[in-house]
Image (spheres, rainbow, N blue to C red):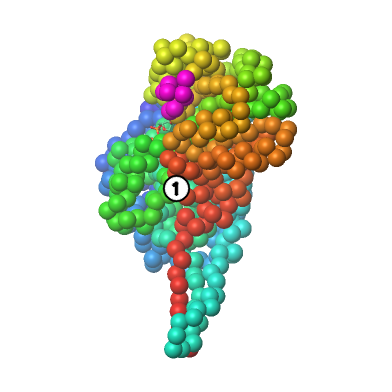
């Protein structure tokens, strides 16, 4: 059984939700795993068991895919009008808003992130994404196309149709936001879905499943199967009756997904890792740039695919900026996310803690110096000190690889061409930022950076209308904005001889 929760101020719905083993959602029903197996999720702030969850594997994925196929082809879903699909998504966003506090607490307990951010960022962002996508339901159009084929007259047009049954595999760093990014565009175009949340953070997705039923989505349209990547995730990626797989997570697993999708050549979209360059020029508004650079790496304990983990600073202001970021690091109130005063929580799991500490150690062993941080914090929770590493070299692992923790490597530069070349020297290309008061320089550099998003004088600004995705090994395809609709639709050309 789950350990007692020691926060009496918790929302009563959260306590109730955690008090029972959670089942999976298949074909509109809450069911146990076919194997009857369950697994535990942990509170990263304490290391205690938080909840017990049904452990889906290949058989459950198969069951869920069959339900999604039936719902796609013969249930009420194919006849649901675009405006009704939009209404359902809007209704879901309203329900989520009604339950915002409950979702925020659940997210914080499961993932560790500060309640402050679950309340102000994670759940509100998920709500916005459902609302933004709801508006697209009635605006998905084809074209009439003049064609020049000889011998007759033709009337030709294109249709945008749902790609079919979609498998979606999401990570643990923003569980609700990731669920919304995946579900909203797929549902608005008329697909059906099997969603596999991360083993570390399945709880908000499962609670969302309850609201999906309450909103009135027909059975089988959304199926949610918690479980492990190597079993449930791999089975979903390889399933022959899945038309498309959408994945967010590590580049390493992204490559496995691609291999697994080979069998039936299902469509694949991938949002993968990053090692994003954050470039501060000498003419920047330094106060804003320093705080922005600290937030760029420390937000969400550094567990952001876009984390500004390579900080390039002009040599004339290097010491000043590094000192400022180090001061910002020291000011964090580190503690359990559920404490409203906390603004830096634990990392998600013991595995992630070990991984982040392993990277810090490797950097320090190779000659890097920690201006601040560099250690794990004592205790049972998975807490890491916010860390700034200097004296780093381009070949070090800490500079090349995604750490996914509150650890930034800081590197001085002299010339714009030099910093662009260094920034682009990465297998990743997810995001980048430039801090300068020179607007021409900002846009010229933005054009040269090989990244799917470039922020100028800001960082981690996301919007449901802004396309997001990666260059190079940071991914395939763009989520959000109308670009996301392309991930979940096929274009059909219809040609009639008149
Ligand atoms: P993974 O890439 O392993 O996890 C992401 C999702 O993929 C989870 O749902 C996971 O399942 C699932 N998965 C794992 N293996 C397979 C597989 N063989 N087939 C199908 N699905 C699979 O990330 P980790 O949790 O292992 O984190 C490791 C590193 O990945 C982090 O340190 C970070 O560098 C990077 N990462 C990047 C993210 C991003 O947003 N770009 C997000 C998360 C991690 P389950 O967790 O249930 O095993």
* Foreground pick, 118 / 483: 483
In what element is the residue under mark 1?
A: strand
223 sits to left or right of 263:
right
Residue 284 against residue 227 in the figure, above or below: above
* Foreground pick, 429 / 477: 429
- The span shown in magenta is 393-401
What residue would you read off at disc 1? 476
What residue is at 43 percent from the left and 36 percent from the top? 427
Q: Quadrant of the N terminus?
A: top left
Residue 374 against residue 162 in the figure, above or below: above
Residue 297 against residue 84 in the figure, above or below: above
Whole-percent x and y of residue 324? Answer: 66, 17
Whole-percent x and y of residue 63? Answer: 31, 52
Residue 332, image quadrant: top right
Q: Pointer 1: residues within 10 angstroms few (<14), some, or many (20+)?
A: some
Whole-percent x and y of residue 476? Answer: 44, 47
The answer to whether residue 177 shows anywhere in this view is no
What residue is at 52 percent from the left and 21 percent from the top? 409
* Foreground pick, 155 / 84: 155
Is ligand 1 within 8 Å of the beta carbon of the residue shown at mark 1? Answer: no
């Amino acid at each position: 059984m789950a350990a007692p929760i020691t926060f009496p101020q918790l929302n009563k719905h959260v306590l109730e939700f955690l008090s029972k083993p959670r089942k999976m959602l298949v074909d509109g029903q809450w069911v146990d795993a076919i194997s009857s197996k369950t697994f535990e999720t942990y509170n990263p702030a304490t290391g205690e068991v938080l909840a017990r969850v049904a452990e889906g594997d290949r058989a459950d994925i198969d069951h869920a895919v069959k339900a999604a196929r039936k719902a796609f082809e013969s249930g009420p879903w194919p006849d649901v009008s675009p405006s009704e699909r939009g209404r359902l998504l809007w209704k879901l966003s309203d329900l989520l808003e009604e339950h915002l506090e409950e979702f925020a607490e659940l997210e914080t307990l499961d993932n560790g992130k500060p309640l402050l951010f679950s309340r102000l960022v994670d759940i509100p962002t998920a709500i916005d994404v459902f609302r933004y996508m709801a508006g697209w339901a009635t605006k998905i159009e084809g074209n009439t196309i003049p064609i020049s084929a000889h011998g007759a007259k033709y009337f030709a047009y294109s249709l945008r149709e749902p790609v079919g049954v979609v498998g979606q595999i999401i990570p643990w760093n923003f569980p609700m936001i990731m669920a919304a990014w995946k579900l909203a565009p797929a549902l608005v175009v008329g697909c059906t879905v099997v969603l596999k949340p991360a083993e570390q953070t399945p709880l908000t997705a499962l609670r969302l499943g309850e609201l999906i039923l309450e909103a009135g989505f027909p059975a089988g349209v959304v199926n949610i199967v918690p479980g492990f990547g190597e079993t449930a995730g791999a089975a979903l990626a390889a399933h022959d009756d899945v038309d498309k797989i959408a994945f967010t997570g590590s580049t390493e697993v992204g490559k496995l997904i691609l291999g697994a999708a080979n069998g039936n050549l299902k469509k694949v979209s991938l949002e993968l890792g990053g090692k994003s360059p954050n470039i501060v020029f000498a003419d920047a508004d330094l106060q804003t740039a320093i705080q922005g650079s600290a937030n760029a790496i420390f937000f969400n304990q550094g567990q952001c695919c876009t984390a500004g983990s390579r900080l390039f600073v002009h040599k004339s202001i290097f010491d000043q900026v590094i000192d400022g970021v180090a001061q910002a690091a020291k000011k964090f109130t580190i503690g359990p996310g559920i404490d409203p005063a906390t603004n830096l929580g634990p990392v998600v799991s013991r595995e992630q803690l070990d991984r982040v500490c392993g990277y810090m150690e490797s950097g320090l062993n190779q000659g890097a110096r920690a201006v601040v941080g560099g250690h794990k914090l004592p205790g049972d929770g998975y807490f890491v000190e916010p860390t700034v590493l200097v004296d780093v070299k381009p070949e070090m692992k800490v500079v090349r690889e995604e750490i996914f923790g509150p650890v930034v490597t800081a590197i001085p530069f002299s010339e714009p061409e030099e910093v662009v070349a260094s920034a682009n020297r990465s297998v990743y290309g997810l995001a980048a930022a430039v801090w300068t008061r020179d607007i021409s320089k900002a846009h010229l550099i933005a054009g040269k950076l090989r990244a799917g998003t470039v922020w100028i004088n800001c960082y981690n600004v996301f919007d449901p209308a802004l396309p997001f995705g990666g260059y190079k090994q940071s991914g395939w395809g763009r989520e959000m904005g109308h670009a996301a609709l392309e991930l979940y639709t096929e274009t059909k050309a219809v040609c009639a001889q008149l």
